Image (spheres, rainbow, N blue to C red):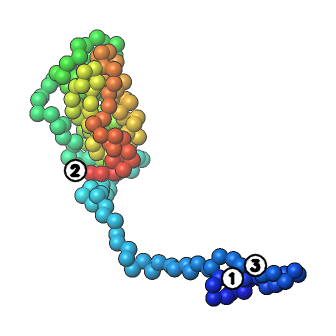
């Protein structure tokens, strides 16, 4: 049993008659949140994709109809390079024009990964991949839009496709690690 006193707490007398003193009580104050301010959210400038898309079990025609109403992802490279369609195991030279040509062919061959076809856009696949730069034997790309697969899987497939045709490439990476997040998949 503790008894309050002006300078702290005291236990009643013990069998020997001595009293023990304890530390003074601490008053707890609860916040009323009056000084709380909302944190500045840097994500306010992001546009979230809220469009309605066709369902997986809808007909191909309906998916294509919905997808035709959506713009395909733009390819952010002003140079127009013809697709270089060669089989896996080819030994192409590593330079920018070759990478751009192989990426152009890849967009067609791995078409189900990207939103370049109306049917894919119809079910919400609006993603695209762009060439950013060649950094020695490393290719840097940009993932944009919405993908059905995890973005790391898309990057892995792109990397595999390029490396199978241009064996000098030792790595394919994204310009910003945020592009591999789930949050990036929902930004339009």
The tag on residue 69 is: 2
The tag on residue 20 is: 3
Compared with 136, 152 (above or below) is below
Q: Residue at x 62, y 80 (%)?
A: 25
Q: Residues within 10 Å of mark 2 (few under 14, many from 20)?
A: few
| Residue 172, quarter of the rendered image | top left
Give the spatial CA distance, label 3 vs label 2. 83 Å
Comparing marks 2 and 1, which lies closer to the viewer?
A: 1
Q: Residue at x 28, y 45 (%)?
A: 145
Whether residue 11 is visible: yes
For the image, the number of numbered tags is: 3
The tag earlier along the polypeptide, 3 or 1, is 1
Of 37 and 160, nearer the camera is 37
Comparing marks 3 and 2, which lies closer to the viewer?
A: 3
The tag earlier along the polypeptide, 3 or 2, is 3
- The residue indicated by pointer 1 is 9
Residue 5 point in image, percent of width and height = 67, 88
The tag earlier along the polypeptide, 2 or 1, is 1
């Amino acid at each position: 049993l503790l008894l309050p006193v002006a300078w702290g707490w005291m236990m009643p007398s013990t069998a020997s008659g001595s009293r023990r003193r304890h530390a003074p009580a601490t008053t707890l104050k609860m916040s009323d949140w009056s000084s709380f301010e909302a944190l500045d959210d840097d994500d306010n400038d992001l546009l979230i994709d809220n469009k309605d898309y066709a369902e997986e079990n809808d007909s191909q025609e309906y998916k294509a109809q919905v997808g035709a109403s959506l713009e395909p992802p733009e390819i952010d490279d002003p140079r127009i390079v013809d697709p270089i369609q060669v089989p896996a195991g080819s030994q192409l030279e590593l330079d920018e024009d070759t990478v751009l040509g192989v990426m152009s062919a890849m967009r067609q061959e791995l078409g189900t990964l990207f939103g370049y076809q109306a049917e894919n856009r119809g079910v919400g696949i609006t993603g695209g991949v762009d060439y950013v730069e060649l950094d020695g034997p490393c290719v840097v790309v940009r993932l944009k839009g919405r993908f059905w697969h995890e973005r790391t899987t898309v990057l892995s497939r792109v990397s595999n496709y390029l490396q199978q045709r241009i064996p000098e490439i030792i790595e394919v990476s994204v310009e910003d690690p945020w592009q591999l997040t789930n949050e990036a998949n929902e930004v339009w």
